[in-house]
DNA sequence: CGCGCCGTTGAGCCCGTTCAAAAAGTGTGG
DNA sequence: CCACACTTTTTGAACGGGCTCAACGGCGCG
């Protein structure tokens, strides 16, 4: 019951034991008894409205976060004001690690796209948990490696692919990641999609003007339909071929 | 000519206790007594000649590696034959992690640029070590996060910077990383540099032809001199300004 | 010597950008 | 319901950075 309500609008504090993103996220390897004690490692839960920041470049870096609901993105703003999106964040995703582990300042910012709820873990308590429960540390390690592999994939995209391919690739990836968070996402061909063309441009290293042109074209060819908060992909295979997308690459999290 | 071989050339089996890259690498947090027992976690040491592969895309993924000497690069080969370099590897660097931790196949390949020596750690024994010594696991975590941050930096480069900036940025980064491995690297303005223009192109997402043109230009302007296995940067500040390079960002490893 | 690899140069083209402006949502308050 | 402001998407015209294709010179090596 609490579970059902969480999916819609978690305005109240969520207990780890009944958190619906747990099977996807940091505490996946914990047994159900352990989960209740895990509660103590979390410091708070926070809601951020669309366009708001979870943290900004230059902020003190003292915690990591799990996204409980909504969409967000991690980005760097360059000196000339240009922006590069480095990651899109979906429910269950863990973010906010930095090499210094709690002593430095944020190199990147995380901005909410929709309204989001985040769960806060101070570095200190997270480290304590890792020391006490090595299998959590191992799981953490593998989550970060997965992030790195994703970043490598994006690098190859930006370095060696055309605009069409980059956009197709990104949309397929987000489509798959969003599907993996649905109860029975296999047969779905339309998802809620709060991503603007400007965001796509900032992720793909293009101008929003050119993104508009290319997407218009992809639309005409019947490869995808995007707009009004929805993304429809009628034929994944055809788009995947165009984009050189490898569905074999494991995605960040999949529902159990 | 001076340090044509970085410090020394370990042709014989190196013991962890006397390994010169240890202060930079995986076993940094170990005490000297621990180091001798750490020896048991390492399975072997391997030498690869220039152009040879430490592993290739599709290989079984069973170990991680520490680079003991030489230069290498990690890259992905796309379906159309194009290549994207994802990381340059210098002595002390750890590489070879994948999310599945020993069960999947390699998504990327690691190729030797110069002759290299690598130290092999099977996943299993590494995991055992992490369970027994949590501070090693924490150090591992922070090393991988640093790699991810580096990858993010490259993403921003490829997405939002011009060819001049990308090349300048890459050369400065490699320059700094190489310097950090020298005994007194602060005052140095020339390093051994076994990187061809084709490699730079594959890292920056450009053609080697265009790299040649841009570097000719940078050379004419007195910003750098690159060739014959050496890189000379007379005025770091000027180049850094051109490239939008932030020296504040912490590099992978620095000599103690 | 021939062969490969690396760097260089030139001519022409194309993808994506820049600049400018209009059209089509979207949300707010009257 | 409309008026208004704002964001998002679309369209057009012209420019240019980086690519393609092709050829050549230098160097190391068997």
Image (cartoon, coloured by chain):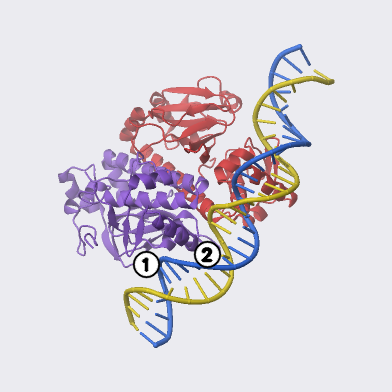
Chain colours: A red, B purple, C blue, D yellow
Classify A71 as above or below B85: above
Residue B7 percent location from the top left of the image: 20, 57
Give the camera-side residue of B224 and C15: B224
**Residue at image mark 1:** B51
Residue A113 percent location from the top left of the image: 58, 31
For the residues labelled 1 and 2, the Cα–Cα distance comes to: 17 Å
Asked if badge 1 and badge 2 are on a common chain, one would say yes
Q: Is residue B61 visible?
A: no
**Residue at image mark 2:** B81
Residue reaching furthest left? B33
- Asked which quadrant contains residue D10, the reply is top right
Q: Which of marks 1 and 2 is nearer the N terminus?
A: 1
Residue B214 percent location from the top left of the image: 46, 57
Classify B103 as above or below A58: below
Q: Residues within 10 Å of mark 2 (few under 14, many from 20)?
A: few
Give the camera-side residue of B231 and B89: B231
Give the camera-side residue of A220 and D25: D25
Q: Are marks 1 and 2 in contact (CB under 8 Å)?
A: no
**Which chain's residue wears label 1?**
B
Q: How crowded is mark 1: few (under 14 residues within 10 Å), some or many (20 or more)?
A: few
Q: How many labels does the image show?
A: 2
Q: Residue at x 54, y 36 (%)?
A: A90
């Amino acid at each position: 019951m609490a579970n059902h309500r969480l999916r819609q609008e978690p305005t109240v504090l969520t207990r780890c034991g009944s958190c619906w993103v747990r099977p996807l996220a940091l505490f996946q390897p914990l047994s159900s008894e352990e989960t209740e004690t895990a509660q103590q490692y979390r410091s708070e839960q926070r809601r951020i409205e669309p366009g708001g920041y979870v943290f900004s470049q230059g902020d003190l870096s003292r915690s990591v976060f799990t996204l409980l609901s909504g969409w967000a993105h991690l980005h760097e703003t360059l000196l000339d004001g240009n922006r590069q999106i480095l990651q899109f964040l979906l429910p269950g995703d863990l973010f906010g690690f930095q090499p210094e582990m709690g002593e430095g300042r944020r190199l990147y910012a995380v901005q909410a796209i929709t309204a989001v709820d985040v769960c806060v873990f101070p570095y200190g308590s997270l480290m304590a948990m890792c020391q006490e429960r090595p299998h959590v540390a191992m799981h953490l390690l593998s989550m970060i490696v997965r992030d790195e592999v994703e970043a490598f994939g994006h690098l190859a995209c930006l370095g060696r692919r055309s605009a069409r391919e980059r956009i197709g690739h990104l949309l397929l990836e987000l489509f798959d990641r969003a599907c993996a968070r649905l109860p029975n996402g296999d047969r779905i061909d339309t998802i809620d999609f709060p991503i603007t063309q400007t965001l796509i441009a900032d992720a793909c290293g293009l101008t929003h003007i050119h993104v508009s042109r290319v997407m218009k074209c992809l639309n005409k060819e019947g490869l995808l339909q995007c707009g009004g908060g929805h993304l429809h992909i009628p034929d994944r295979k055809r788009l995947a071929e165009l984009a050189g997308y490898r569905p074999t690459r494991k995605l960040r999290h999949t529902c159990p």
